Image (cartoon, helix red, strand yellow):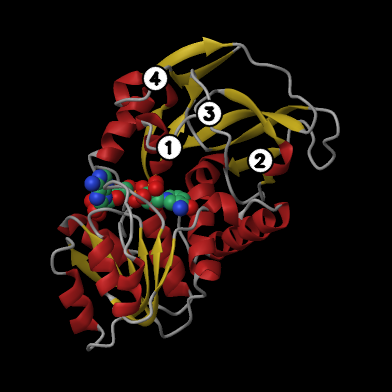
Amino acid sequence: MTHAIRIHTHGGPEVMRWEEIPLPEPGPGEARVRHEAVGLNYIDVYYRTGLYKAPAMPAILGMEGAGIVTAIGAGVSHLAVGDRVAYASGPIGAYATERSIAADRLVKLPAEIDTRTAAAMMLQGMTAQYLLRRTHTVKAGETIVVHAAAGGVGLIMCQWAKHLGATVIGVVSTPEKAELARAHGAAHVVIGISHLVEEVKRITQGAMVPVVYDSIGKDSFTASIDCLAPLGLMVSFGNASGPVGPVDVGMLGAKGSLFLTRPSLATYTSKRSDLERSAADLFDVVRQGAVKIRINQTFPLRDAALAHIALEARKTTGSTVLLP
Ligand code: NDP
């Protein structure tokens, strides 16, 4: 048996229930992992509310965990019982004390990275990795805009982009969050979206920026587009304020032959080789100390609903882990 946070219907945090459920043996190609820590991510909120549909009900939430391999299924050769591993991918099911998952989604942890740090960083850190190194290759000397700069993905992006030599304009909602983003590498911080475009114009002396990383969605889309230089790239990678909705493609032409992408970590790590490269890149910057993982909140896994309430109320900063 295992304990898990399940939902039987989509809705608010009150639909999350702590339940005891059977733990099947790992099937062919799977490994069973006893979680030492589970990552909290905004995507968990989308699956809870129904913005993203769970494949079946009841559903166990969660995309990210780290722990110890306790059993392996037929045909798994790259892992052994006792290995320390982490993952950041679907299918959902991480809010559990123990689970089985496709073994090719698991990455072995280097000795220097503990499981709590791994659960805090795999999803948010590999997201920062593909956004900064693949969706757009951030170059030294570039000025970029990063929304939710004091959040989980945000604090990692600020540090990593600075390490790459970029100047980060972070966007946050409070002076406290502004201080935190600055302490983690944002050269400039704008509080709120209402003055964002004029601030970016002032900071860049009218040049505007080659790329905006926007995880807010509905509330910030238009302002983000207006921060771009001609031929700039709008990276719309999240919907914390709600989905963007239909886009007028002609507008991209009128505003300077802009590019628009809606990327996801699932696509960027679907090949095992990409997953390994992304994780290795992340482990490197963390080991060097260029990126520090800030676990600013922990909750018992059984109280995951309280973690969701805090995340949606914009009360969290940095990363949050749930402890089984
Ligand atoms: P965060 O820790 O960044 O928390 C979300 C933050 O969004 C809040 O703290 C808040 O910061 C900001 N925000 C702005 N408007 C709202 C709103 N209306 N309601 C709630 N929050 C709001 O979360 P994560 O680091 O887990 O994720 C950040 C974003 O990145 C999410 O949108 C997530 O979906 C996306 N993401 C996308 C991935 C992909 O591959 N496409 C992968 C991983 C994450 P403030 O108060 O400063 O405005």
Amino acid tagged 4: Thr
Looking at the rendered image, the quarter that the N terminus falls into is top right
The span from disc 4 to disc 3 (Cα, nearest Å) is: 12 Å
Label at residue 85: 2
Question: Looking at this view, is 68 or 278 the one in front?
Answer: 278
Residue for point 47% across, 45% down = 120
- Mark 2 and mark 1 lie on one chain; the one further toward the N terminus is 1
Q: Is residue 2 above or below residue 263?
A: above
Q: Do the residues under discs 4 and 3 have CB atoms within 8 angstroms? A: no
The span from disc 2 to disc 4 (Cα, nearest Å) is: 31 Å
Tell me the crowding category of disc 1: few under 14, some 14 to 19, or many 20 or more residues within 10 angstroms, Cα based: few
- Mark 4 and mark 3 lie on one chain; the one further toward the N terminus is 4
The span from disc 3 to disc 1 (Cα, nearest Å) is: 9 Å
Q: Please state the horizontal and vertical placement of residue 27, each as a whole percent of the image.
A: 76, 25
Closer to the observer: label 3 or label 2? 3
Q: Which residue is mark 3?
A: 55
Q: Which residue is mark 1?
A: 52
Q: How many callouts does the rendering have?
A: 4
Asked whether mark 3 lies closer than 8 Å to ligand 1, one says no
Q: Which residue is mark 4?
A: 9
The span from disc 4 to disc 1 (Cα, nearest Å) is: 13 Å
Secondary structure of residue under mark 4: loop
Secondary structure of residue under mark 2: strand
Secondary structure of residue under mark 3: loop
For residue 73, which quarter of the picture? top right
Instruction: Give the left or right position of residue 246, taking residue 263 as reference.
Output: left
Q: Residue furthest left?
A: 194
Amino acid tagged 1: Tyr
Asked whether mark 1 lies closer than 8 Å to ligand 1, one says no
Question: Looking at this view, is 293 or 308 the one in front?
Answer: 308
Question: Looking at this view, is 316 or 30 the one in front?
Answer: 30
Tell me the crowding category of disc 3: few under 14, some 14 to 19, or many 20 or more residues within 10 angstroms, Cα based: few
